[in-house]
Image: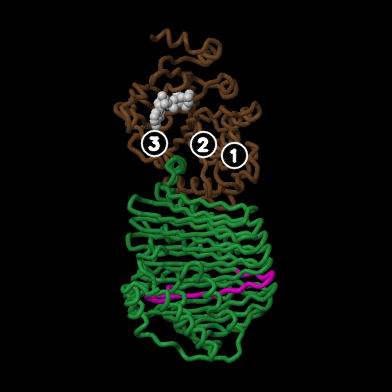
Amino acid sequence: MLEIKNLHVKLEEEDKQILKGVDLEIGAGQVHAIMGPNGSGKSTLSYVLSGKDGYEVTDGAATLDGADLLEMEPEERAAEGLFLAFQYPVEIPGVGNMTFLRTAVNAQRKARGEEEISAGDFLKEVRARAKELKIDADMLKRPVNVGFSGGEKKRNEILQMAMLAPKMCVLDETDSGLDVDAMKLVSEGVNALRNEGRSFLVITHYQRLLDHIKPDVVHIMADGKIIKTGGPELALEVENNGYADLLGETA
Amino acid sequence: MALPQLKADATTARLDGLSLPDGAAWATEARQAALARVTSAGLPHRRDEYWKYTDPASLVQPDAPKASLFHNDEGPLFANRDRVQIVFVDGVFSAEKSSDLAAEGLEIGLLADALATDIHWAKDLYGVLETNGQTPVERPLAALNTAFASAGAVIRVTGKATKPVNLIYLHENTTSDAMIHNVVKVEAGAEMTLLETGPAAARFSKCLEVDVAEGGTFHHVRAQGRDHERRAVTHCFARIAKEATFKSFTLTANGVLTRNECIIDIIGDDAVAHVAGACVGDGSDFHHDDTVFITHDAVNCESRQVFKKVLRNGATGVFQGKILVKEGAQKTDGYQISQSLLLDEDSQFLAKPELEIYADDVACSHGSTSGAIDEDALFYLRSRGVPHKQATDLLTLAFLAEALEEIEDEDLAEDLRARLDNWLARRG
Ligand SMILES: Nc1ncnc2c1ncn2[C@@H]1O[C@H](COP(=O)(O)OP(=O)(O)OP(=O)(O)O)[C@@H](O)[C@H]1O
Ligand SMILES: [Mg+2]
């Protein structure tokens, strides 16, 4: 599904290398987790995959089912089935959440040569999905993320993911800012989307999320590289001992 | 004080080809007085403080610069709304194109007829509100209009009007130089909506005097454009009595030069005055100026100014807005915001927001900003699959939304939103 090879990324404006050779391969239907100290480059990886400005790929490649992601515009990547749940979802005053969702769904359909969703079907689906995530009608009417609490913003990300039905979902610290119940809701939302055609890359600092969303593979990222890959037990090791040992091992 | 020679010459040159229209004695008196205001103030010049950001030369020069006719493939605005239609072609009333002027709650007449009538209610307003609006800042182009305009509508609102009145200004002559003067008197507790649409003329001077009596309501929705070469100077003078409401919104699309002045005097307690505008301009030949002056001279009144401008490819936007709170006008709630969205670095927004307050128990705020599209929001939309252009348009409309929300009638707002959608969609 997602294949990242020797990815090197620096900031466009500064001479600062952030990713220093990331290798990662996620098979269809798999859930991978990435953990790692603050500033190790996890969000940068997610931004580079989704095409945010400001980064320069100096070496390496990233493909989604063989298609070269790095050559595409952000919207093309989305239409190919890539989705990023933002660590910090953006507020967009003046754009209603519903309008936003429908515009996005239809834009992707159009890009794939499919027909637009009817207003009725769309409404039905949004309502059903929103209900599962305990997002009320008022939140759907409000401008995108404006005045949403931290947890509401994260749930709104998962709602978008559910509506867009991507094949490769990158979740950047979707658990941060969530209370225990919201964490469960969000995890259930994610788990409901799990299937053999859809893969996940879950960036998190905490084992707790991984209790709910059971990963197949766990990676540790440090200083712009994956320094260790293992099974779910690796996350437990981090939870118990922190990164010191792991960093020491490679030093 | 004698006028500077340049100004005196320009004024003389402009007045040279004009003659005062005939009318009843009171009308002639009003026109002569207006003419005297013009000659004593002189027509505006770039060096006048009030015209610092907008060069009035083409509004003052004797002949109207040519403006090509614009074919609007979108059809007439508000076409699906039931309304009284009063049509002027290049500033001349067209009975044939207009609808029946009889309407519930309204007495509608033509300015030419009113000014030829010996006893007419318009006598108390024609040139009167304009004169009030000449202090503390002179507005000679409005006085010029009062002196020479012979066309327009006079509307007395006696009850709750059941449908809006649409003044439709058609443009059919490439060198037309039109002056229109409208007078509206909203009687106590009465209510109406006035719509104004159409390109009007190559050069258009328009004056609107509105008197809203106690508890009356006046809604005004206007659209200027989409013709590109139009030059227009418009003045709206409003006097708002106790518990009365005045709400005006203007959408401007294109036009080489537009100066919209709105002068509001709030003279009765508990009154409300809102004036808002959205404008979209594309190209270095677009210049749009909103100049607003609101005077609070009563207790517990609210005023709002909400102006948004989208400027691209070297377009220029201007905002001069003032709130004057007179002594004793306690509990005034004054709000003013002017913002521009600059879609490139060649475009510019010049703003002069002003507050002048002589009462101590008031809440007044103003803000002015100028900025580009929010890159984070743009990326967020694109990451959800919305193409760059569509995402930019969505954010642009979102930016204008706050101004459009000032329109109370949802149907009218919807019609304007659709026009804005199209305006953006036509641009690559
Ligand atoms: N646009 C930018 N400008 C300057 N520095 C940046 C930029 N983007 C990333 N960095 C730097 O790159 C490094 C990696 O940042 P990144 O956000 O990817 O870390 P992270 O692993 O997601 O951290 P966290 O766990 O705190 O979310 C940090 O040192 C950060 O300051
Ligand atoms: Mg991060």
Check disc 2: other Cα within 10 Å, few if <14, some if 14-19, many if 20+: some
Secondary structure, mark 2, is loop
B17 to the left or right of B415: left
Chain under callout 1: A
Magenta stretch bounds = B199-218
Chain under callout 3: A
Check disc 1: other Cα within 10 Å, few if <14, some if 14-19, many if 20+: some
**Colour brown, chain:** A
With respect to residue A203, does A161 lie above or below? Answer: below
Q: Provide residue A101's location: percent of width, then percent of height.
A: 53, 45
Check disc 3: other Cα within 10 Å, few if <14, some if 14-19, many if 20+: many
With respect to residue A224, does B213 lie above or below? Answer: below
Name the residue tied to disc 2: A89
Do the residues indicated by labels 3 and 1 lie within the same chain of the protein? yes
Rendered-image quarter of ligand 1:
top left
Q: Where is the N terminus of chain A found, in terms of image quarters?
A: top left
Q: Are marks 2 and 1 in contact (CB under 8 Å)?
A: yes
Residue located at (33% from left, 76% from top): B10
In this orientation, which residue lies closer to the viewer: B359 or B149? B359
B159 to the left or right of A116: right
With respect to residue A57, does A234 lie above or below? Answer: above
Secondary structure, mark 3, is loop
In this orientation, which residue lies closer to the viewer: A214 or B396? B396
Instruction: Give the alpha-carbon distance from disc 3 to disc 1, as whole Å.
Output: 26 Å
Residue located at (33% from left, 53% from top): B346
**Colour green, chain:** B
- Looking at the image, is mark 3 or mark 1 earlier in the sequence? 3
The kind of residue tagged 2 is: Pro
Instruction: Give the quadrant of residue A81.
Output: top left
Q: Which mark is residue A203?
A: none
